[in-house]
Image (tube, helix red, strand yellow):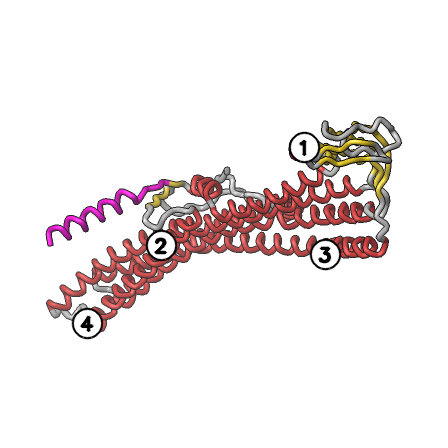
Amino acid sequence: MKKSIVIAICLLATFSLSAKEYVFSLNECIQFSLKNSSELKSQKGSLKAAEGLHDWAKGLAYPKLQLFSFLTMDGERTGNAILSERNWTLSRWGPYYNLNATLLQPLFTWGTISGAKEATRNLRLVERERYREKKMKLIQEIKTYYYGHLYVKRIHQVLNFGFKNLNGALEYARKEFAKSSGKITRPDLSRLELGMLELKKFRLEADKMGKLAMDALKVKLGLPRNATIKTREKYLALDMTKIKPLAEYVKIAYKYYPMWRQLKYGIKARNAQVKAVKGQALPIFYVGAIFNFAWSPQSDKQDNSFLNDPYNKLDFGAAVGFQWSLDFWSTKGKIKQAEGERDKLVKLKPFARDGLKVQVKQAYLDLIQKKKLLANLRLAVKIARKWMIFGLAGYQLGTTKSKDVLEGLTSFLLKRKEYYEALMNYNLALGKLGLVTGKELSKNLVY
């Protein structure tokens, strides 16, 4: 039994030591996520592949050197082109070495190589924008969970205030009811007790929401579940970034929005692809050089330039030539396919442009609406506070009933909850506007 207790204590100690504590501001949280996110690391693989494809296209313009070489053992050869003799006696065997080298440098390809380089360069930019799109979505998710955690901290503050005031009213009611003074009836007491149970239920819901937000945040940060995260911000605060006119955000979106930039780069890539495919239908001009060397001491050398001597020779030279694959029908099909892929993107551009403008406008109006709602709720909290204070004071004096106390307190707590929820939603709406414009809009965040 003692041994089991010691083992359990050791395991608990090991677990507690392995649980690392992290302290983040929202900005630090985002920076940490961008460095450690598995999602972004996975997306980098696609970006690396696109960069490799572009390197391949650039390599098409460089000289191509082909080498073929071998070394073997061969029997003795004597004679000439008319009379020859082979000697397979093992003692008469010797080395035979052969080297063939061809160097080709493209001179003019009718846009095949330049089109391939341009197409792959723009495809690389498309992948870069996809990476940026993934990055911005991750940042918005981090904001959602981080603000959600801060919101729960605020709600706990609200609930603690409610518990404190309702406890005071409940203690007073129980004393008066026990004295049978007639000030408090059984329904009055029950109403207050039910109010206390409702507050406890809200606290359980807040605890659940806070735990889920923190667990989700750890997943996005790539941290183990037993890690502890503490926030530098004590409570949720309003982002004070100044809101610009709608037209400014539309301009920003046309300049920075990742999917819009993907479309523009995609059209450029398809145009270059059409150019490259059309060039394949025409001859490729090149300058080339050859070098052939063979050596076999067991074979008689043929001192005649009109005879092909594959065993002892040294040939080299340079020339200008062309290569032409006359496959018009297949090439025509490839051109048509490339033009069709380009046309799809070109026809999509006006629709995407209008859709982006609507998307930005929707996010902007949502932000403005939430800003107005915040102002209204700020005023509502003040009014509800007065109602609650007068209700509690009157209850102590015996001029108001428990129903008035509960209604005043409930109204105040509800309006404070709605206010902090609206504050969180406003901050997230600002992030959403940044998401659809492709640029971080909060002046508080630099990453």
Say which of marks 2 and 3 sits in front.
Answer: 3
Which residue sits at x=66%, y=56%? 355
Residue 10 in percent (x, y) is at: 20, 46
Q: Which residue does the numbered mark 4 point to in the structure image?
A: 185
Closer to the N terminus: mark 4 or mark 3? Answer: 4
Closer to the N terminus: mark 2 or mark 4? Answer: 4
Estimate the spatial distance between the alpha carbons at disc 4 and disc 3, rounded to whole Å. Answer: 72 Å
Q: Amino acid at mark 3?
A: Leu
Q: Secondary structure at mark 4?
A: loop
4 and 3 marks in contact (CB < 8 Å): no
Which residue sits at x=74%, y=43%? 116
Tell me if 149 is positioned left or right of 323 in this view.
Answer: left
Closer to the N terminus: mark 1 or mark 2? Answer: 1
Q: Residue furthest right?
A: 306
Q: Closer to the camera, 50 or 247?
A: 50
Say which of marks 1 and 2 sits in front.
Answer: 1
Say which of marks 2 and 4 sits in front.
Answer: 2
2 and 3 marks in contact (CB < 8 Å): no
Q: Secondary structure at mark 3?
A: helix
Q: Which residue does the numbered mark 1 point to in the structure image?
A: 93
Q: Closer to the camera, 239 or 118?
A: 118
Residue range of the region highlighted in magenta in the rendering: 1-23
Q: Closer to the camera, 348 or 160?
A: 348
Q: Which residue does the numbered mark 3 point to in the structure image?
A: 348
Estimate the spatial distance between the alpha carbons at disc 2 and disc 3, rounded to whole Å. Answer: 43 Å
Q: Image quadrant for the N terminus? A: bottom left
1 and 2 marks in contact (CB < 8 Å): no
- Give the numbered dot on residue 210: 2
Above or below residue 180? Residue 357 is above
Tell me if 50 is positioned left or right of 85 in this view.
Answer: left
